[in-house]
Amino acid sequence: MANHGAPEPITSDTAINVPETGQPTTETSTLTRRQRSAKSNRSPKSSTACFSFDTFVLTVSQGIALWKMLKKGESVVQSLPSDNIMDLTDALITPIKTLCCFETQEGGNDMVNLGTSVITPNHHIRTAEGWMTALQAVDRGQGMVYQSMLQRVYNLCLEGGGNILINTSPQPGVMTFTPAATMGYLFAPASDSQQNSSLSYPEDIQTQLGLRQDLSYGYAHFRLGDVETLPNGKLIFDNITGDIPQKQPRTPFT
């Protein structure tokens, strides 16, 4: 049965290379809903929508799909109509343009553990109820929030934009293909209770990202505060143009 927007579980009968599910190694403590509510009036410690370094993304290798950690130079699977990672028939595959690394705030950051995936609370994923943040998914009973000491988190710029697929199943040997946003998206909340929210990758935003020099080398490193993700997904760069200053040649001693 094809995946028509909502993530569907895939059993181990049709799965290979499935990462084991367990508690994140960076976990220090989980947060209750009351604790999260008490923190809601404060700015998030990390406002960039990202993944941990050990979050597995569905990629392509030698004609099949594999779960691999984020890496530049790979191609990712954006949709898998066959629901079988051994069968890429009609799958949508997109190259990674840039792997982006973001430094986090010292003293710990909130992260959300969803199955084998660890992402920032404001990162958008698509569930059966539509697009929502990871924190909203937790409030609906999926995953948990914990305090992490990760020093860096990561995201991707894809050729032309679009989502990636992560595994959010809490059960070992079972995969739930969940679309997750990458850089350059625009989120639109539902206008009423009868509609789902939507998420797109506008051409003008992708063009702006494509013109940035700092995103043109396959890998980009941003310090804390260099980039902010607004609630609608818009990226605010401290370096507006993305130009990389040329190093001045040293003046030789005379």
Image: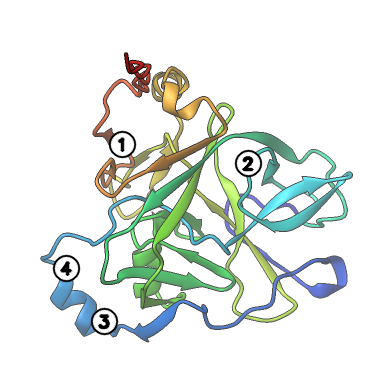
Which of 219 and 138 lies nearest the eye of the viewer? 219
Asked if the residue at tag 1 contacts the one at tag 2, i.e. Cβ–Cβ closer than 8 Å, the answer is no
Left or right, 116 with respect to 87, comes to: left
Quadrant hosting residue 86: bottom right
Q: Which residue is mark 1?
A: 234
**Lower sequence index among marks 1 and 4:** 4
Type of amino acid under label 2: Lys
**How far apart are the alpha carbons under marks 3 and 1?**
27 Å
**How far apart are the alpha carbons under marks 4 and 3?**
10 Å
- Please name the residue shown 87% across and 50% down the image: 87
**Lower sequence index among marks 3 and 2:** 3
Helix, strand or loop at mark 4:
loop
Q: Which mark is residue 72?
A: 2
**Lower sequence index among marks 4 and 2:** 4
In the image, residue 174 sits, relative to residue 125, either above or below, namely: below
Q: Which residue is mark 4?
A: 40
Q: Which mark is residue 102?
A: none
- Please name the residue shown 57% across and 33% down the image: 218
Residue density around tag 4, few if under 14, some if 14–19, many if 20 or more, within 10 Å: few
Helix, strand or loop at mark 1:
loop
Asked if the residue at tag 1 contacts the one at tag 3, i.e. Cβ–Cβ closer than 8 Å, the answer is no
Q: Which residue is mark 3?
A: 33
In the image, residue 19 sits, relative to residue 96, either above or below, namely: below
Residue density around tag 1, few if under 14, some if 14–19, many if 20 or more, within 10 Å: some
Q: Quadrant of the C terminus?
A: top left
**Lower sequence index among marks 4 and 3:** 3
Which of 168 and 55 lies nearest the eye of the viewer? 55
Quadrant hosting residue 11: bottom right
